[in-house]
Image (spheres, rainbow, N blue to C red):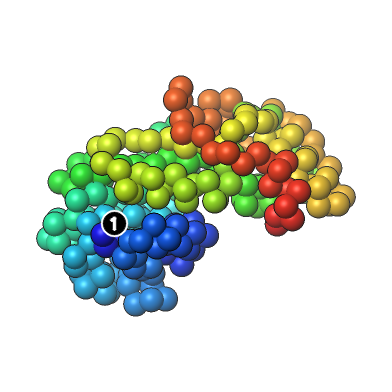
Amino acid sequence: MKIVVIGGSGLIGSKLVALLRNKGHEVLAASPSKGVNAVTGEGLSAAIQGATVVVDVANAPVWEDQAVLEFFEKSTQNLLAEEKAAGVKHHVALSVVGTDRLLTSGYFRAKMAQEKLIAAGTVPYTVVRATQFFEFVGAIAQSATDGQTVQLPPAMMQPIVSDDVAAALAEVALAEPENGIVEIAGPEKIRMDELVRIFLTSKGDARQVATNGQARYFGIDVNDQSLTPGANPRLGRTRFTDWLTTGAV
């Protein structure tokens, strides 16, 4: 079966491509660096021709409100049009747990717009909403750093490692379309301030985490429901502390 992975050169995409190829499928890793640009449409028709499944894991290169909205709207519109013409049977898109609860953020408004376009289209689909990746914990710390202090809220999270995200996407891509949303998360819940505190300690980072109920997550007010999945998410296997002991960065 031919499967096209949009964003196939990135963190998740490269892992997904390898997993699907190991399962014996013909997989095209599509990205601008490979001559396939979903936003401009360059190379898209030829890439999708003959595909049964298209998995979109591409992320916007900039997060300014209007630019990120245009990225997700244009790329999704182009993908769905080409998929319809090519007879693609399943469109899979990677999104974020809590997207519908974080709409004060331009990025999440853009992801919501992407999800709505997919749901309104004619191509059978599955939207996979994932929680925050372990690999992004350093960026969370950096975004909240002031001198040697990291100001973070005690909001509950349930982060997941990128390997487990890729594995879940592979399963979804090879299954029948849900025509709805699937949530994936890590095996454990943990508060954001504690997550970053454990991360910094493991790295020998001298910064201190200050728990602040008024602090924001990338400029967004969050609570215990903002970043956690609903009742029945699919769970990854890798625990955060185990990932850290493997020499993760």
Can residue 38 be seen from the camera position used here? yes
Say which residue appears at 38% left-offset and 36% top-offset.
182
Say if 70 sits above or below 245 in the image.
Answer: below
Observer-nearest of 48 and 168 = 168
Q: Position of residue 151 (x, y in %)?
A: 74, 39
Quadrant of the image containing the C terminus? bottom right
Observer-nearest of 80 and 107 = 80
Say which residue appears at 81% left-offset and 47% top-offset.
202
Left or right: 244 with respect to 34?
A: right
Left or right: 205 with respect to 110?
A: right
Amino acid type at mark 1? Val
Left or right: 164 with respect to 195?
A: left
Q: Position of residue 216 (x, y in %)?
A: 63, 37
Q: Residues within 10 Å of mark 1 (few under 14, many from 20)?
A: many
Observer-nearest of 221 and 136 = 136
Quadrant of the image containing the N terminus? bottom left
Left or right: 89 with respect to 162?
A: left
Query: Which quadrant of the structure image shows residue 51?
Result: bottom left
Query: Which quadrant of the structure image shows residue 70?
Result: bottom left
Tally of numbered discs: 1
Say which residue appears at 19% left-offset and 51% top-offset.
89
Say which residue appears at 32% left-offset and 72% top-offset.
36
Q: Which residue is mark 1?
A: 54
SS for callout 1: strand
